[in-house]
Image (spheres, grey):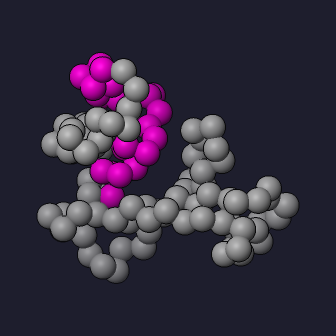
Protein backbone atom coordinates (compact mmCIF):
# COMPACT_ATOMS: atom_id res chain seq x y z
CA UNK A 1 0.00 0.00 0.00
CA UNK A 2 2.97 2.33 0.59
CA UNK A 3 4.01 2.11 -3.06
CA UNK A 4 0.46 2.90 -4.19
CA UNK A 5 0.31 5.95 -1.89
CA UNK A 6 3.70 7.16 -3.11
CA UNK A 7 2.65 6.67 -6.74
CA UNK A 8 -0.56 8.68 -6.24
CA UNK A 9 1.40 11.43 -4.42
CA UNK A 10 3.89 11.59 -7.31
CA UNK A 11 1.03 11.76 -9.80
CA UNK A 12 -0.45 14.67 -7.87
CA UNK A 13 2.87 16.52 -8.15
CA UNK A 14 2.86 15.93 -11.92
CA UNK A 15 -0.81 16.81 -12.41
CA UNK A 16 -0.27 19.25 -15.29
CA UNK A 17 1.60 16.63 -17.27
CA UNK A 18 -0.64 13.65 -16.47
CA UNK A 19 -4.14 15.10 -16.25
CA UNK A 20 -4.54 14.97 -20.03
CA UNK A 21 -3.97 11.20 -20.00
CA UNK A 22 -7.02 10.32 -17.91
CA UNK A 23 -10.72 10.40 -18.61
CA UNK A 24 -13.02 12.04 -16.10
CA UNK A 25 -12.27 14.21 -13.11
CA UNK A 26 -8.66 14.24 -11.88
CA UNK A 27 -9.48 14.12 -8.15
CA UNK A 28 -11.95 11.25 -8.66
CA UNK A 29 -9.29 9.37 -10.63
CA UNK A 30 -6.70 9.76 -7.87
CA UNK A 31 -9.23 8.70 -5.25
CA UNK A 32 -9.93 5.54 -7.25
CA UNK A 33 -6.21 4.88 -7.78
CA UNK A 34 -5.69 5.13 -4.01
CA UNK A 35 -7.88 2.08 -3.46
CA UNK A 36 -6.31 -1.41 -3.26
CA UNK A 37 -7.11 -3.54 -6.28
CA UNK A 38 -7.49 -0.67 -8.73
CA UNK A 39 -5.51 -1.38 -11.87
CA UNK A 40 -3.06 1.18 -13.15
CA UNK A 41 -2.01 2.11 -16.65
CA UNK A 42 0.26 4.49 -18.50
CA UNK A 43 -0.08 7.44 -16.07
CA UNK A 44 1.00 5.21 -13.19
CA UNK A 45 3.80 3.62 -15.22
CA UNK A 46 5.20 7.06 -15.96
CA UNK A 47 5.71 7.88 -12.27
CA UNK A 48 6.35 4.42 -10.80
CA UNK A 49 10.06 4.22 -11.76
CA UNK A 50 10.77 7.25 -9.58
CA UNK A 51 8.82 5.68 -6.71
CA UNK A 52 10.58 2.29 -6.84
CA UNK A 53 13.91 3.69 -8.10
CA UNK A 54 14.02 1.24 -11.00
CA UNK A 55 13.38 1.63 -14.72
CA UNK A 56 10.31 -0.05 -16.20
CA UNK A 57 10.34 -1.35 -19.76
CA UNK A 58 6.99 -2.06 -21.37
CA UNK A 59 7.21 -4.48 -24.28
CA UNK A 60 4.46 -4.31 -26.84
CA UNK A 61 4.40 -6.88 -29.61
CA UNK A 62 3.81 -5.49 -33.08
CA UNK A 63 2.77 -8.88 -34.48
CA UNK A 64 0.87 -11.78 -32.90
CA UNK A 65 3.02 -13.88 -30.54
CA UNK A 66 3.72 -17.37 -31.82
CA UNK A 67 6.47 -18.31 -29.38
CA UNK A 68 8.41 -16.87 -26.46
CA UNK A 69 11.22 -16.12 -28.93
CA UNK A 70 9.02 -13.37 -30.40
CA UNK A 71 9.70 -11.32 -27.24
CA UNK A 72 13.40 -11.15 -28.12
CA UNK A 73 12.93 -10.28 -31.79
CA UNK A 74 13.35 -6.48 -32.16
CA UNK A 75 11.41 -6.57 -35.43
CA UNK A 76 8.35 -7.90 -33.61
CA UNK A 77 8.25 -5.62 -30.59
CA UNK A 78 8.22 -2.06 -29.42
CA UNK A 79 9.88 -1.21 -26.10
CA UNK A 80 8.70 1.83 -24.17
CA UNK A 81 11.17 2.83 -21.47
CA UNK A 82 10.09 4.63 -18.31
CA UNK A 83 13.09 5.84 -16.30
CA UNK A 84 13.31 7.28 -12.77
CA UNK A 85 13.39 11.08 -12.80
CA UNK A 86 16.58 12.96 -11.98
CA UNK A 87 15.44 13.69 -8.42
CA UNK A 88 15.18 10.01 -7.49
CA UNK A 89 18.04 8.11 -5.91
CA UNK A 90 18.11 5.43 -8.58
CA UNK A 91 21.27 3.46 -9.13
CA UNK A 92 22.22 3.07 -12.78
CA UNK A 93 22.88 -0.61 -12.05
CA UNK A 94 19.22 -1.31 -11.21
CA UNK A 95 17.87 -3.83 -13.70
CA UNK A 96 14.61 -2.80 -15.35
CA UNK A 97 11.26 -4.28 -14.49
CA UNK A 98 9.94 -5.75 -17.75
CA UNK A 99 6.22 -5.78 -18.46
CA UNK A 100 4.37 -7.16 -21.48
CA UNK A 101 1.49 -5.04 -22.77
CA UNK A 102 -1.20 -7.16 -24.43
CA UNK A 103 -3.43 -4.33 -25.58
CA UNK A 104 -6.82 -3.49 -24.21
CA UNK A 105 -5.15 -2.14 -21.08
CA UNK A 106 -3.71 -5.48 -19.89
CA UNK A 107 -0.13 -5.77 -18.59
CA UNK A 108 1.78 -8.86 -17.40
CA UNK A 109 5.06 -8.93 -15.50
CA UNK A 110 7.73 -10.76 -17.49
CA UNK A 111 10.48 -10.76 -14.86
- Picture quadrant of residue 70: bottom right
> Residue farthest to the bottom?
93
The quadrant of the picture occupied by the N terminus is top left
The secondary structure that most of the magenta stretch takes on is helix
Residue 66 spot, x, y in % from top left: 85, 61
> Residue farthest to the right?
66
Using the image as rendered, state which of residue 44 and residue 17 is in the foreground: 17
The number of discs equals: 0
Residue 32, visible in the rendered structure: no
Residue 47 lies in the magenta-colored region: yes
Q: Going 23% across and 63% down the picture, which residue do you hit?
A: 85
Q: Is residue 18 left or right of residue 70?
A: left
Residue 38 spot, x, y in % from top left: 44, 28
Q: Going 40% across and 26% down the picture, which residue do you hit?
A: 23
| Image height of 43 relative to 65, above or below | above
Residue 104 spot, x, y in % from top left: 63, 37
- Picture quadrant of residue 56: bottom left
Q: Going 26% across and 53% down the picture, which residue do you hit?
A: 51
Q: Is residue 42 left or right of residue 101?
A: left
> Residue farthest to the front?
20
- Picture quadrant of residue 14: top left
The magenta span reads 25-49
Residue 9 lies in the magenta-colored region: no
Residue 8, visible in the rendered structure: yes
Using the image as rendered, state which of residue 90 and residue 82 is in the foreground: 82
Residue 5 spot, x, y in % from top left: 25, 37
Q: Is residue 68 left or right of residue 10?
A: right
The quadrant of the picture occupied by the C terminus is bottom right
| Image height of 32 relative to 105, above or below | above
Q: Is residue 33 left or right of residue 70?
A: left
Using the image as rendered, state which of residue 35 and residue 15 is in the foreground: 15
| Image height of 84 relative to 28, above or below | below
Amino acid sequence: MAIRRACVAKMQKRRRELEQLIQGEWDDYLTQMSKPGTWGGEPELSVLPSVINMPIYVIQLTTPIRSVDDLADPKKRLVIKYEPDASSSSSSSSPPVRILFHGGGHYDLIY
